[in-house]
Amino acid sequence: MSQQAFDINEFIEKPQPPPAPVADKAAEPAAADEPPELDVQKAVVEELAAEKVELHEQIAARELELAARASELAARESELAALKAQVAVLKSENAKLCAEAESLQARLDARLAHELDQQERNPNSLALLDREVELPDRFPGETRDHVLEVIRAARDEAEREGRVRRAQVLEAVLVANEPSGNLAARRAEVTKLFSENGNIVNGTVLARLQELEISHKNGEEYLLPSEIIKRAF
């Protein structure tokens, strides 16, 4: 313990240091970068509300698109059903046509078999134009086509005169003997040749007539185009 005596009076009289100033809490400014908690919650709510509206709009748009797709699908399904119905009808019609074709083929085969049988039983029923003739053809089928034209004219005359049986016989011959068509083609060719050359027997016409072995004169007399066609065909 200190040996120095404690003087209470000296202690009392000694001046004390002034107390430190106390800061006024109300005067302290609030931090500017820290908004109040209520404002933060309000901003969050507003942001969530905006997102909710946007999501609802997206959902509505998707629902409209889905409805349009569903309508389009229904239309396509209806078209498909109609096409299937058409295919079924076409298949049915095709089956009927095939059956008719088979029936016609069977009738044709039977008719041909009957004709062959008749020819075998009666030699006179063979085609009348298949016999050799002394006059050679200028072109394939010339003789046959000439004879068939005569028979056709005779058939027409018989029909006009009411000679039914003759017309039937001549018609049967025509059915059994198809023309080659070469006679009509040659006649049409020469007719066109004269027409293209103004119905004048010029060098071009004469050259072609010589190729076809068609005469353009009767002795020393020149023939008209119509007379040449008549004499040649």
Image (tube, rainbow, N blue to C red):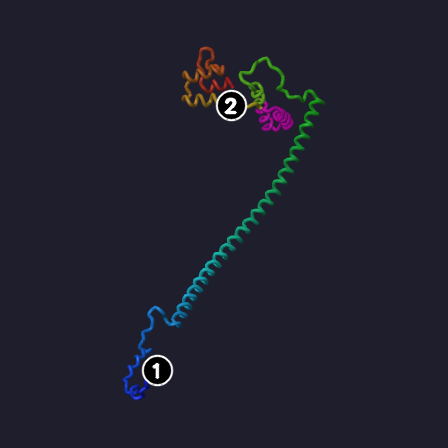
Q: Could you tell me which residue is drawn at 45 percent across and 23 percent down?
A: 192
First in residue order: circle 1 vs circle 2: 1
Judged from this view, the residue extending furthest toward the right is 121
Q: Nearer the viewer, mark 1 or mark 2?
A: 1
At mark 1, the secondary structure is: loop
State how far apart marks 1 and 2 are (Cα): 164 Å
Residue of label 2: 185
The quarter in which the N terminus is drawn is bottom left
Percent across and percent down for residue 125 are 67, 22
At mark 2, the secondary structure is: helix
For residue 174: magenta? Answer: yes
Dominant secondary structure of the magenta stretch? Answer: helix
Which residue range is magenta in the image?
151-178
Q: Which residue type carries mark 1?
A: Ser
Q: Could you tell me which residue is drawn at 30 percent across and 88 percent down?
A: 9
Nearest the eye: 103 or 95: 95
Nearest the eye: 156 or 36: 36
Residue of label 1: 2
Percent across and percent down for residue 227 are 47, 18
Nearest the eye: 208 or 90: 90
Q: Could you tell me which residue is drawn at 32 percent across and 88 percent down?
A: 8
Nearest the eye: 50 or 176: 50
The circle drawn on residue 54 is none
Percent across and percent down for residue 105 are 65, 33
Q: Is residue 58 above or below residue 181?
A: below
For residue 177: magenta? Answer: yes
Q: In this view, does 205 lie above or below 36?
A: above
Q: In this view, does 184 lie above or below 76?
A: above
When asked about the image quadrant of residue 12, the answer is: bottom left
Q: Which residue type carries mark 2?
A: Ala
